[in-house]
Amino acid sequence: MQLILASTSKYRRELLARLRLPFTSLAPQVDEEPFKNCGATPASIASLLARLKAESLSGFDPDAVIIGSDQVAEVDGQVLSKPGTAEKAITQLERLSGREHRLHTGIAIWHRFRCQLHVDTTTLCMRTLQRAEIERYVELDQPLDCAGSYKVESLGVSLFESIQSSDQTAIVGLPLIAVSTMLRQIGFQVP
């Protein structure tokens, strides 16, 4: 079976490569922005976008197994988008400073018109940060393409007091425990 990752994210590619399964990475054909503020819960948005990303490539090969994934960071029920600029990243991190927030990582595995879904929710508590710390962090780690404006797999881990997660890989963008389980159910040999 051909395995396709519906993502061009280098973080997701690196994570999936850890399973040592051959796969192809393709850009999903989904515009995420209309869904980010659609009124649904952040976890539902992550799940929906993961499914839409996987389904968007289903015409590529009808027998392929396609993995879609999406992350939605939220504080007080409000979605935090990828910042895109240093100033927006600084603003997001100031908002998260000294507070708890959640990161929802949705996974969809599409195979032969069937879709398995999973959402992993991580609760993160950021320590209280000074503006100068935030600016230094953003300059050093450049988290402009990351939900929540931080890279926990890099220097961003120093911003936190605590992280509660059932799968640490979910924070980076692809919960490998769930992905491994779902792929084994389809027939892949994942040790």
Image (cartoon, rainbow, N blue to C red):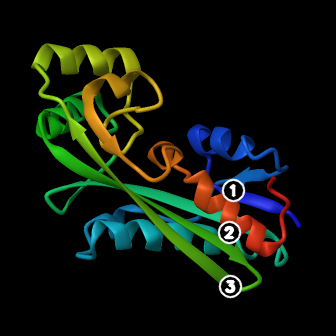
Q: Residue at x 66, y 38 (%)?
A: 14
Q: Please name the residue that numbered disc 1 is placed on.
A: 5
- Name which residue type carries label 1: Leu
Under circle 2, the secondary element is helix
Q: Residue furthest bottom?
A: 113
Q: Percent x, y for residue 103?
A: 34, 52
Tell me if mark 3 has few (under 14), some (14-19) or many (20+) residues whose alpha carbon lies within 10 angstroms of its own: few
Q: Please name the residue that numbered disc 3 is placed on.
A: 114
Point out the frontmost of discs 2 and 3.
Answer: 2
- Name which residue type carries label 3: Arg
Q: Percent x, y for residue 40?
A: 27, 76
Q: Residue furthest right?
A: 1
Q: Percent x, y for residue 26?
A: 70, 54
Q: Percent x, y for residue 174?
A: 56, 51
Depth check, front residue: 176 or 34: 176
- Which of the image's four quarters has the N terminus? bottom right
